[in-house]
């Protein structure tokens, strides 16, 4: 049996194929490229000629509908994450549980499976999120900040003269032209923000946390002044695969 996970994010949709727990291949498409032609290409590469078990997770209802309609029209059975979450017991401290994004709760469930407790999952996506699994193994709460690429684009399109730059690591804090100043501001600004938020969370919770980094820009932050136990761009997809294996019956 082949597992397929579909992680529908605000910017990127990630299709992953797993054999048991091993990631075999993946396809990422941007939200603005989602159409029937693209879905048919993915179908040919992922679904044709093999028996699959599929899980759909989404934070974008309109794209979720497009993909689910396509799966139904092609007689491809699937599970919705929200249905499988009803089978999973985890204590959640957040007041309005229905507002929690699929990606955030998925990350917490998998972090609890691997590390049991006292873990912060930092996801560098369209938004940068920090989610806290406390010492009791409860989803205690989290932080949401603007994502790196989103902020870079806003800076470009909401100013008259500032250029759009690519996010990168810089050696020096002070830049000596506009491009360098933006590059430094974003790299060291986000580095300082992440380190500062971890410190404040630990002071507030009076405990030390293990750190997981995921999302497209995770590798840039491997040198934060805190022990990082895992860096995995596909952590959320692997979490979905774990949920599909355990509860998708």
Image (cartoon, rainbow, N blue to C red):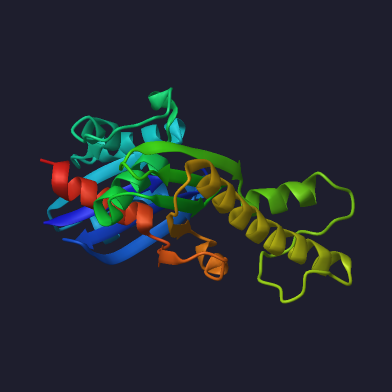
Q: Is residue 124 above or below residue 24?
A: above
In the rendered image, the quadrant that contains the N terminus is: bottom left
| Residue beneath the point at 43% across and 62% down | 233
- Which residue does the image show at 39% across and 53% down from the upper left? 14
| Foreground residue among 30 and 75 | 30
Q: Residue furthest front?
A: 206
Residue 98, percent from left and from top: 39, 25
Task: Report if residue 247 is visible in the image.
Answer: yes
Between 47 and 88, the one lying in front of the other is: 88
Query: Is 112 placed left or right of 152 in the picture?
Result: left
120 vs 82, left or right, is right
Total numbered labels placed on residues in the image: 0
The residue positioned farthest toward the top in the image shown = 96
Question: In the figure, residue 56 lies in which quadrant?
Answer: top left
| Residue 44 visible in the picture | no
Q: Is residue 194 above or below residue 70?
A: below
| Residue 115 sits above or below residue 57 on the image | below
């Amino acid at each position: 049996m082949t597992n397929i996970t579909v992680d529908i994010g605000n910017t990127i949709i990630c299709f992953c194929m797993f054999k048991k727990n091993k990631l075999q291949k993946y396809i990422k498409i941007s939200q603005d490229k989602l159409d029937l032609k693209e879905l048919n290409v993915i179908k040919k590469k992922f679904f044709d000629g093999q028996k699959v078990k599929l899980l759909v997770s989404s934070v974008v209802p309109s794209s979720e509908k497009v993909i689910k309609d396509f799966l139904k029209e092609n007689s491809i059975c699937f599970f919705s994450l929200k249905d499988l979450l009803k089978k999973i017991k985890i204590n959640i401290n957040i007041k309005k549980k229905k507002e929690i994004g699929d990606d955030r709760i998925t990350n917490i469930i998998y972090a609890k499976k691997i590390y049991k407790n006292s873990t912060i999952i930092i996801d560098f996506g369209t938004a940068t999120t920090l989610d806290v699994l406390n010492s009791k193994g409860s989803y205690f709460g989290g932080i949401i900040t603007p994502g790196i690429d989103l902020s870079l684009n806003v800076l470009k399109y909401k100013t008259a003269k500032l250029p759009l730059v690519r996010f990168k690591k810089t050696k020096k804090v002070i830049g000596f032209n506009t491009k360098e100043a933006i590059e430094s501001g974003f790299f060291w600004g986000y580095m300082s923000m992440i380190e500062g938020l971890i410190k404040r969370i630990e002071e507030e919770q009076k405990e030390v946390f293990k750190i997981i980094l995921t999302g497209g820009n995770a590798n840039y932050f491997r040198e934060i002044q805190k022990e990082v136990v895992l860096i995995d761009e596909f952590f959320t997809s692997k979490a979905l695969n774990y949920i599909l294996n355990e509860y998708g019956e």
